[in-house]
Image (cartoon, rainbow, N blue to C red):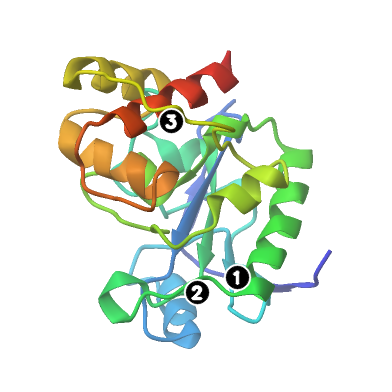
């Protein structure tokens, strides 16, 4: 495993008593430089943090101990749980994001993430469907890690899910909304939730429209969870 540097962010608190760590939430930093991202995640005035930050060269920094609650997800929900921070580990990937010149994630960065994630999954009871992006748990607010993130690569490494095949199949909006909720999404704004789902599982066309391809991928994922 790659060496992990230790940096102490003050932005954390205790997890709720008896709460198991059963989620991983992936983010991009959304800042112009790695130094800027590290500074913000360690700034007490910012009141944000993550457990780990992975630079584009593959360097991994631990900012908050896993047993503590880092402040990374914000207002979020997954599978009916609204204290996502209380039960998750947050991993930030250095990338300028959509605001500052979004680009593909570097090979060294992805390799380091695989290495880190394998260790996390060995330590904690995390189901594959609970390896998610920030936009999955906060579809009305967030876009990260975005449509350029290589989710199929992670799934092939045993980290998260990807539908093996996704036959297009007709579905109406109500059925897709029900399937999204069944998988784990909050659906208060169905259009934005469809967009978040596509950003993760149908990145080639992220348009927020209910179509057969989106429905087919949802059905494929739900089949993997049964």
Q: Nearer the viewer, residue 7 or 84?
A: 84
Nearest to N terminus: mark 3 or mark 2: 2
Which disc number belongs to residue 217?
3
Badge 1 crowding class, 10 Å Cα cut-off, few under 14, some 14 to 19, many 20 or more, is many
Direction from residue 140 to residue 12 in the image, left or right: right
Residue at horizontal 59 percent and vertical 77 percent from the top: 55
Q: Position of residue 155 (x, y in %)?
A: 64, 43
Q: Nearer the viewer, residue 202 or 99?
A: 202
Residue at horizontal 58 percent and vertical 79 percent from the top: 56
- View extreme (right): residue: 1
Direction from residue 28 to residue 74 in the image, left or right: left
Q: CA distance from mark 2 to mark 1?
A: 6 Å
Look at the numbered disc 3 and give the secondary structure of its residue.
helix
Quadrant of the rendered structure where residue 182 is? top left
Residue at horizontal 54 percent and vertical 17 percent from the top: 223
Residue at horizontal 19 percent and vertical 16 percent from the top: 174
Q: Indicate which label's residue lies in the foreground, 3 or 2.
A: 3
Q: CA distance from mark 3 to mark 2?
A: 29 Å
* Residue 206 appears in view: yes
Look at the numbered disc 2 and give the secondary structure of its residue.
loop
Nearest to N terminus: mark 2 or mark 1: 1
- What residue does disc 1 label? 54
- What residue does disc 2 label? 94
Nearest to N terminus: mark 3 or mark 1: 1
Quarter of the picture holding the N terminus? bottom right
Q: Position of residue 102 (x, y in %)?
A: 37, 74
Q: Indicate which label's residue lies in the foreground, 3 or 1.
A: 3
Q: Position of residue 37 (x, y in %)?
A: 44, 78
Direction from residue 173 to residue 94 in the image, left or right: right
* Residue 138 appears in view: no
Badge 3 crowding class, 10 Å Cα cut-off, few under 14, some 14 to 19, many 20 or more, is many
Say if mark 2 contacts mark 1, CB within 8 Å: yes
């Amino acid at each position: 495993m790659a060496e992990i540097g230790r940096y102490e962010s003050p932005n954390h608190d205790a997890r709720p008593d008896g709460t198991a760590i059963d989620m991983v939430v992936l983010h991009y930093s959304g800042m112009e430089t790695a130094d800027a991202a590290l500074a913000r995640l360690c700034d007490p005035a910012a009141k944000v943090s993550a457990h780990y930050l992975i630079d584009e060269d593959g360097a991994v920094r631990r900012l908050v101990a896993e047993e503590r609650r880092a402040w990374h997800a914000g207002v979020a929900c997954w599978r009916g749980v609204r204290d996502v921070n209380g039960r998750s580990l947050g991993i930030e990937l250095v990338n300028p994001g959509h605001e500052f010149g979004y680009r593909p994630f570097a090979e060294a960065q992805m390799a380091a993430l695989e290495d880190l994630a394998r260790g996390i999954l060995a330590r904690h009871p995390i189901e594959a469907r609970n390896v998610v992006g920030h936009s999955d748990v906060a579809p009305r607010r967030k876009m990260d890690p975005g449509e350029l993130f290589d989710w199929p690569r992670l799934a092939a490494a045993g980290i998260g899910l990807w539908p093996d095949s996704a036959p297009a199949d007709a579905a109406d909006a109500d059925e897709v909304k029900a399937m999204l909720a069944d998988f784990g999404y909050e659906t208060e704004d169905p259009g934005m939730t469809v967009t978040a789902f596509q950003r993760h599982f149908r990145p080639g066309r992220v348009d927020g429209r209910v179509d057969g391809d989106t429905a087919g991928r949802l059905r494929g994922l739900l089949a993997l969870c049964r």
